[in-house]
Image: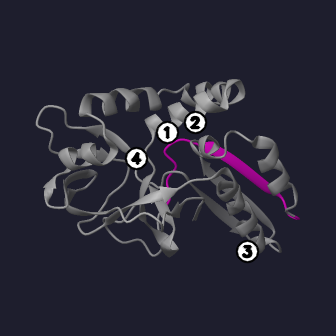
Amino acid sequence: MDSGFQFDKASEREYTITDSDEYLIRGINGKKACEEYCKIIHMRPYFINMLQKLNSNSNVVKLFRKLSQASETLYTGIRNAMVKPFGTEFIRGNPEMLVVLEVDEKEEIYILTQSYKAKGTKLKKLKNYPEEQLAVYDNLYDKVSNSGGVIICSCAMRPLWYNFNYKALEEKIGKFNCPIMVSHVFTELGTELPYEENRNLIHSGVIKALVFK
């Protein structure tokens, strides 16, 4: 597993999950999660939910690709409004982007995320640059250059982060000297080994490589 995100070391913003249950975060810094999260990203619950409904539309990837081709400014502005780059640490210290699927508009208590976040988990601001997102394939090449083959499962949202530069991606994987297949899929599943109960099962914005020796 790898991630093109990095923690923003220049930012002092760090938040602690103080109450969680499966995929629900109920408390951040000892306060209601919804209330605290809305303060962090400066949005009200109804607006967050509206954006996430748009973000989960099956045509969102096509929409963003067309926007990226039409206007860099428009593309970046809408992307930044829809997805706030905060994340948590997962395997080998890599950041996993925090994806908020829904916030509780009625009681304003919880936020629903894409993966389990245990009590005590730290939320930190992430840095995101196309070059770093594409560099994960260089890192992978260094590790598996002598393998018999590689299957890469890449989150379908990853093209958003390197601005749909498929040509650059093809150049990266073109230097592999073994058979390679890359698939872009939604809600990709992956687990840390050995498996432990209540550990993250769904990792957003990352790639997972199955390497054949």
Where does the magenta region start and end? 177-190
Marks 4 and 2, how far apart at CA: 18 Å
Marks 1 and 3, how far apart at CA: 32 Å
For residue 185: magenta? yes
Q: Earlier in the sequence, mark 3 or mark 2?
A: 2
Q: Secondary structure at mark 3?
A: helix
The amino acid beneath tag 2 is Thr
Q: Position of residue 89 (x, y in %)?
A: 43, 67
Q: Earlier in the sequence, mark 1 or mark 3?
A: 1
Name the residue tied to disc 2: 76
Residue 35 in sight? yes
The amino acid beneath tag 1 is Asn
Q: Earlier in the sequence, mark 4 or mark 1?
A: 1
Pointer 4 and pointer 1: residues touching (CB < 8 Å)? Answer: no
For residue 99: magenta? no
Q: Secondary structure at mark 2?
A: helix
Q: Position of residue 162 (x, y in %)?
A: 66, 46
Q: Secondary structure at mark 4?
A: loop
Q: Tell me if 95 is positioned left or right of 175 in this view.
A: left
Tag shown at residue 99 = 4
Q: Secondary structure at mark 1?
A: helix
- At x 46%, y 50%, the residue is 85
Which one is closest to the eye, mark 3 or mark 2? 2
